[in-house]
Amino acid sequence: MRDEVKTSCLKRLKRIEGQIRGLGTMVEEDRYCIDVVTQIAAARAALRRVEEEVLRDHVAHCVEHAISSGDKADQRRKIAELMDVIGRADR
């Protein structure tokens, strides 16, 4: 992972960690259910953005390297991994 992507992802994940702690506090304080669900949706959306950033970096470097290497087995492996993870992301 490139350094700038790693830094960005870690920053976002720390923010998400705070959101999750806030959710725990909301539940402990018996906050209104819809407010809790709204914050859960926001945390999921934030995680999706981190996932997209990591995947984008993976394609830009790992998959691109496999393609430029000319190694057909590595190319097939990287594409299969990518398709698997994209398939799981929609579940």
Image: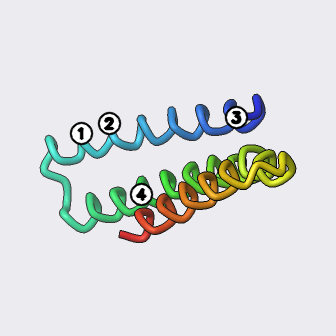
Instruction: Work out how far the residue at label 2 is from the one at label 1, CA to CA, in angstroms.
Output: 6 Å
51 or 76, which lies in front? 76
What residue sits 36% from the left and 57% below the top? 39
10 or 79, which lies in front? 79
Vertical comparison of 12 with 83: above or below: above
Closer to the chain start, of discs 3 and 1, is: 3
* Label 1 CA crowd tier, 10 Å (few <14, some 14–19, many 20+): few
Q: Amino acid at mark 4?
A: Arg
Task: Report the side of 46 relative to 23 (left or right).
Answer: right
What residue sits 51% from the left and 57% below the top? 48
List the residue tagged with mark 4: 44
List the residue tagged with mark 3: 1
Q: Amino acid at mark 3?
A: Met
Q: Report helix, strand or loop for mark 1.
A: helix
Q: Report helix, strand or loop for mark 4.
A: helix
Q: Amino acid at mark 2?
A: Arg
Instruction: Work out how far the residue at label 3 is from the one at label 1, CA to CA, in angstroms.
Output: 33 Å
Q: Position of residue 77 (x, y in %)?
A: 59, 53
Quadrant for the C terminus in the image? bottom left
Instruction: Work out how far the residue at label 1 is from the one at label 4, CA to CA, in angstroms.
Output: 17 Å
List the residue tagged with mark 1: 25
Q: Nearer the viewer, mark 4 or mark 2?
A: 4
Instruction: Work out how far the residue at label 3 is from the one at label 4, CA to CA, in angstroms.
Output: 22 Å
Are dots 2 and 3 in contact, CB under 8 Å? no
Are dots 3 and 1 in contact, CB under 8 Å? no
Q: Nearer the viewer, mark 2 or mark 1?
A: 2
* Label 2 CA crowd tier, 10 Å (few <14, some 14–19, many 20+): few
Closer to the chain start, of discs 4 and 2, is: 2
Are dots 2 and 1 in contact, CB under 8 Å? yes
List the residue tagged with mark 2: 21
Q: Amino acid at mark 1?
A: Thr
Instruction: Work out how far the residue at label 2 is from the one at label 3, CA to CA, in angstroms.
Output: 27 Å
